[in-house]
Amino acid sequence: ETAMSLPISPTWGQPIPEWLSLQQAAAVYGVSVDTLRRRIASGKLRASRFGVTLIRVRVEDLDRLFRPIPTGDDLTDLRARARNQRPW
């Protein structure tokens, strides 16, 4: 589980939250609230409005947006697979 080493981790016996406020998401992923708002405005991050002022984002959507960058052996494997898939 990804976003759970954060200030939003559930207390004993509570489920992991599915929705985060922009402030929680910014703290978890180390970005600003403005960055999240820009991603929402550009359509790269889905968000839902609850009531007039509350905006929430799903942890699943954040995880998709903030994907890991391959390094080392992972990067070598990706390059080898790409070479093997070339049509020529």
Image (tube, rainbow, N blue to C red):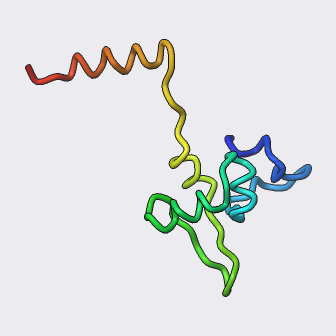
Left or right of 68 in this view: 25: right
The quarter of the image holding the C terminus is top left
The quarter of the image holding the N terminus is top right
Left or right of 32 in this view: 80: left
Q: Quadrant of residue 53?
A: bottom right
Q: Position of residue 25 (x, y in %)?
A: 69, 56
Query: Residue drawn 84% across and 52% down?
Result: 10
Number of labels in the image equals 0
Q: Position of residue 3 (x, y in %)?
A: 70, 45
Identity of the residue furthest to the left in this view: 88
Q: Quadrant of residue 80?
A: top left
Query: Residue drawn 67% across and 46% down?
Result: 29
Q: Position of residue 31 (x, y in %)?
A: 66, 50
Left or right of 81 in this view: 51: right
Query: Residue drawn 67% across and 85% down?
Result: 51
From the viewer's perspective, is residue 7 above or below residue 76?
Answer: below
Q: Position of residue 40 (x, y in %)?
A: 52, 65
Q: Nearer the viewer, residue 32 or 44?
A: 32
Left or right of 26 in this view: 69: left
From the viewer's perspective, is residue 58 above or below residue 4?
Answer: below
Query: Residue drawn 30% across and 19% down?
Result: 81
